[in-house]
Image (cartoon, grey):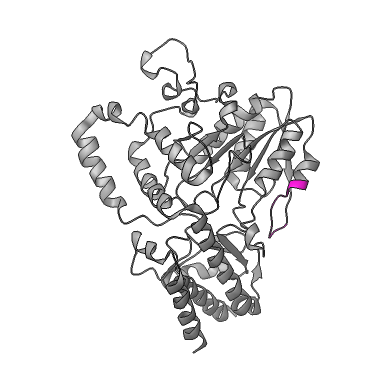
């Protein structure tokens, strides 16, 4: 009876939700009762399958090679400008789409440290996502740099005062995630960037867990470089192309390490020596994937219609609901809360810890409940604001509770 009341309450929240109508824009799978992993892979929009088919049939099949002269060459920057305007808080000419997050992070970090050739340290988060740490380890090995890892609480993230204490005359770059992949802690980009700049260092931000769910003001915050993926809250699909942002005033000085023909000033000149494009295209290397950009373009159109601030407001309501239900139902069963309590310091997911969670995953999946798991024992509840309902969240958390009860 208590569970039925909770579902009714969740339905009332959905009825009052000003964004509820947008859930119908996404493909739904009947056997999925609760999809709580939008922070890893977003649902496709309902228009995307036909859009991809139309692109293959009409633009690729119909126009063939002529498509490059009819807009494909400009597509990575056009989409980047849309991404900057709608999501990143960035003016035109500073963002481009292409490659993977790992490749673009490598390019951005190499470009950042090249701006400070007389410095040999890079500050990072010791508990950051493996790709970020692995890329930095590789760059450090290549260039003889020293990594300075900053530790953070299990339920938090790196703070600006830590960065201010760590940077100094040897710091070339500070490389951090805006939203911590495990805890969802939001790091203060503006304060950290200011602290890095005061020490003469360059900043590189990973926006993978914030872009599309948390408002960004890259120009206002004076960010130097940033990268991010498009398959989480930007719903670009598995392996969708990533993006890189570079502050306009830095562009003439930035040298990225993978020099390819698409990043050259005159790609079709077939020149003897590489000359970088004067703008953001210098971060391209090979031929961009036009087909793979279509789902991202669809989602940006939807975000432009809704507005990122409205998305953020829904995200805060969803995570607050998840926290309330955790306090009432999961904490008494021994689950531990592993995210910030303050909604303004929390991204669009929450993490609960319990040693039984990993073994529960197959049973949850069999029930049509799909959360995310991060070792050693963290269950991430990823809430994609435009496609996740309160009822869906409630049903998913009820399943988690029931499985915990059975686990004893």
Q: Is 154 colored magenta in this rendering?
A: yes
Q: Does residue 147 show up?
A: no
Q: Image height check: is 49 above or below 269?
A: below
Quarter of the figure that contains the C terminus: bottom right
Residue lying furthest bottom: 1
Q: Is 354 colored magenta in this rendering?
A: no
Residue in view at x 45 percent, y 72 percent: 16
Q: State the predominant SS element of the stretch in magenta.
A: loop
Q: Position of residue 189 (x, y in %)?
A: 65, 45
Q: Image height check: is 200 above or below 34?
A: above
Q: Image height check: is 9 above or below 247?
A: below
Residue in view at x 55 percent, y 31 percent: 107
Residue lying furthest top: 272
Residue in view at x 43 percent, y 51 percent: 303
Q: Residue 329 versus residue 80: which sits nearer the camera?
A: 80
Q: Image height check: is 244 above or below 307?
A: above
Q: Which residues are magenta?
A: 153-161
Q: Position of residue 125 (x, y in %)?
A: 68, 46
Q: Residue 403 versus residue 301: which sits nearer the camera?
A: 301
Q: Residue 64 sits in which quadrant?
A: top left
Q: Residue 9 versus residue 91: which sits nearer the camera?
A: 91
Q: Position of residue 151 (x, y in %)?
A: 74, 50
Q: Disc count in the image?
A: 0
Q: Position of residue 285 (x, y in %)?
A: 45, 27
Q: Does residue 344 show up?
A: yes
Relative horizontal placement of residue 199, taking residue 303 as reference (left or right): right
Residue lying furthest left: 62
Residue in view at x 62 percent, y 37 percent: 223
């Amino acid at each position: 009876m208590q569970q039925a009341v909770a579902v009714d309450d969740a339905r009332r929240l959905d009825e009052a939700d000003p964004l509820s109508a947008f859930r119908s824009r996404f493909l739904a799978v009947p056997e999925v009762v609760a999809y709580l992993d939008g922070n890893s892979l977003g649902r496709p929009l309902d228009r995307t399958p036909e859009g991809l088919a139309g692109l293959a049939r009409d633009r690729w099949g119909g126009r063939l090679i002529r498509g490059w002269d009819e807009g494909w060459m400009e597509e990575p920057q056009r989409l980047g400008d849309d991404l900057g305007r709608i999501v990143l808080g960035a003016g035109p000419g500073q963002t481009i789409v292409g490659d993977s997050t790992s490749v673009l992070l490598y390019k951005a970090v190499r470009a950042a440290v090249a701006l400070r050739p007389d410095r040999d340290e890079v500050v990072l988060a010791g508990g950051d996502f493996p790709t970020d740490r692995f890329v930095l380890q590789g760059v450090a090995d290549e260039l003889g740099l020293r990594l300075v890892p900053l530790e953070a609480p299990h339920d938090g993230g790196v703070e600006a005062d830590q960065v201010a204490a760590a940077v100094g005359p040897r710091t070339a770059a500070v490389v951090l995630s805006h939203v911590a992949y495990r805890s969802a802690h939001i790091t203060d980009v503006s304060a950290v960037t200011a602290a890095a700049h005061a020490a003469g260092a360059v900043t590189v931000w990973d926006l993978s867990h914030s872009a599309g769910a948390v408002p960004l003001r890259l120009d206002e915050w004076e960010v130097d470089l940033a990268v991010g993926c498009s398959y989480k809250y930007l719903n670009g699909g598995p392996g969708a192309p990533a993006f890189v942002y570079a502050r306009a005033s830095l562009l003439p000085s930035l040298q990225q390490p993978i020099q390819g023909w698409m990043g050259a000033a005159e790609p079709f000149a077939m020149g003897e020596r590489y000359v970088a494009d004067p703008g953001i295209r210098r971060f391209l290397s090979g031929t961009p994937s036009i087909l793979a950009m279509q789902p991202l373009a669809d989602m940006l159109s939807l975000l432009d219609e809704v507005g990122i601030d409205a998305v953020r407001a829904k995200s805060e309501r969803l995570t607050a609901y998840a926290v309330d239900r955790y306090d009432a139902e999961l904490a008494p069963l021994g689950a531990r809360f592993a995210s910030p309590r303050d909604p303004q310091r929390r991204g669009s997911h929450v993490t609960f810890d319990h040693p039984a969670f990993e073994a529960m995953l197959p049973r949850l999946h069999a029930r049509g409940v799909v959360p995310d798991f991060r070792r050693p024992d963290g269950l991430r509840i990823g809430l994609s604001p435009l496609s996740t309902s309160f009822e869906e969240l409630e049903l998913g958390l009820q399943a988690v509770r029931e499985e915990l009860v059975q686990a004893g």
